[in-house]
Image (spheres, rainbow, N blue to C red):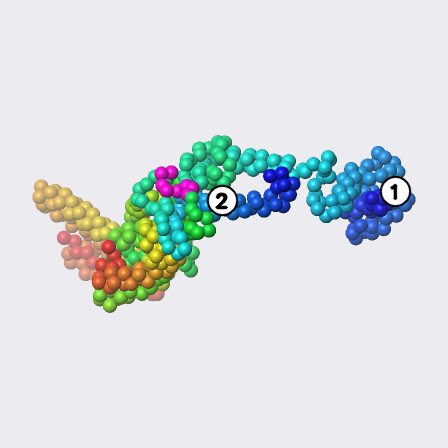
Amino acid sequence: MKRFFGWIPGIANAMVQGPWGGKGDGPDGSDGQGKGDEGKGRDGPRNPWTQPGRPGAKGPSAIEELLRRSKESFGQGGGGFGNLPPRPSGKALWPAAIGILVVLWLVLTCFHRVGPQERGVVTLLGKYSRTLSPGISLTLPAPLENVTTVDVEEIRTIDIGSTRAESENLVLTGDQNIIDLAYSVRWNIRSPELYLFQLSDPDSSVREVAESAMRSVVASVSLEDALGAGRTEIEQQVEQRMQEILDGYRSGIRVQGVAIKQADPPTAVNDAFKAVSAAQQTAQTYLNEARAAAQQVTAKAQGEAAAFDKVYEQYRLAPDVTRRRMYYETMEGVLSNVDKTIVESGNVTPYLPLPELKRRAQGTAAQGSATVEGQ
Amino acid sequence: MQNLVRHPVALALLAIAALLLIGSTIAIVPETKQGVIVRFGDPKKIINRYRPNEDFGKTGAGIILRWPFIDQVVWIDKRVLSVEMERQQVLSTDQLRLQVDAFARYRIVDPLRMYIAAGSEDRVSDALRPILGSALRNELGKRPFRGAALP
């Protein structure tokens, strides 16, 4: 033992700048400084763990003391129970250690904290015994009773197909068209014990059931419905159908909803599809335009007919006056925009169209002229 | 006994032997499994056999005793299992090609016969796959394209 004490202070001193000490591996050369420290006193950067309250104390600190002790016991134990403290009275310590382990085991496996969104399924020697509600519950220790907690509130989502262009999930519709469908299914666990004990792989079951339900529902609707109008109905039908199938398995799963995220024609014919719908829209536009034009014409014609009716009424009342007035009105309309030469009726004969000559001389284009014969 | 207490190594060995004995005598049957007790290759008894619509907690699950080292328990899944078929081509009666994707769900209801006929669950699903495929081809091959592809 003397031998140990001989070199242990040496270890202790080395430890001063050892792993926690002046960080011998520092690149700034604090290594050399730290070593110099030991001899000189307390200048320069110090080991932060040594206690400054004891000037000149070369004695070991608490950690060093512990290390030293463990070294000692290590030496004594001869490589046996290295980590155990030395036996105080020669009595075996391991019963106590086992006792502690047993208590720890009991505490860890008897008390179960079940979160508000969880249920704990207890099996007593493999046999289902009960389901724990949220809170702290007591069970028998581990090998006897096992608790599996299941999150029953969490809504799980399964996506089938994707909205990206490169992957397609093609589904056949009732009128033998193909659509690229992406949808998601939301579900949660209704009955944790059924969920745990009935299906070997519930998650993939939900996926497969969703796919088959979706295919069978889509196969009964037309392309138009699948692409647009009938989506809500499809979603409801799929949900219902899935629930039926899963209930048939007694899976303990509740389908919360099915949402169709995308229903498009497949990429290969998507352009053609767009062209078709564009053409349909154009046709619709033309139809609308034609209808508008027709209405316009009809309205105009009706207006004119009504106006004629009115005029005819007046004409019937006084045919002479009306005729004359109409003649004047027409003449007014015809003559208001042309050059007029008014010639007295009777025996005067115009022999020289003077204004015409003048105009031609000026180089302007000849205007139409009219001669009005007075009545 | 005094001797045993004095010799912890002997005590430990004895404890291990006792644990081994208990472990091979007692078997814990979980709710998700059924089993066949096999004595030297001869199936003796079915434990926790599946019965439709039974409630958990009233099944045959729990603890069972068996003869140590003589009885062997072959565990068989009691849950609904699935077998998936790879996508394959099927011809309909009007010689049109269909790409068919299928899956089947099954449950082993007679573990004894399953053990005798197949031996293990993996072999069951391996055996089911071609059966499913040929049944599918037969059934779809009897129908015209429209009837096969659409309901």
Residue A37 in percent (x, y) is at 87, 45
Q: Is residue B79 left or right of residue A17?
A: left
In magenta segment, residue B63: yes
Residues beneath discs 2 and 1 located on the same chain: no
In magenta segment, residue B70: no
Q: Is residue A318 visible?
A: no
Residue topped by disc 2 = B22
By secondary structure, the bulk of the magenta-drawn segment is best described as loop
Q: Name the one closer to the observer, A179 or A105.
A: A105
Q: Is residue A40 visible?
A: yes
User: Which of the labelled discs sits on residue A129, or is there none?
Assistant: none
Q: Residues within 10 Å of mark 1 (few under 14, many from 20)?
A: few
The secondary element bearing badge 2 is classed as helix
Label 1 marks a residue whose chain is A
Identify whether B115 is placed above or below A70.
Answer: below
Name the residue at 78% across, 52% down: A25
Tell me the quarter of the picture where residue A164 sits.
bottom left
Identify whether A97 is placed above or below A229.
Answer: above
Q: Is residue A102 left or right of residue A277?
A: right
Q: Name the one closer to the observer, B147 or A290.
A: B147
Residue topped by disc 1 = A43
Name the residue at 36% across, 53% down: B43
Residue B93 in percent (x, y) is at 22, 65
Q: Residues within 10 Å of mark 2 (few under 14, many from 20)?
A: few
Q: Magenta region: which residues?
A: B57-64
| Kind of residue indicated by mark 2 | Ile
Name the residue at 88% across, 48% down: A36
Residue A324 in percent (x, y) is at 14, 47
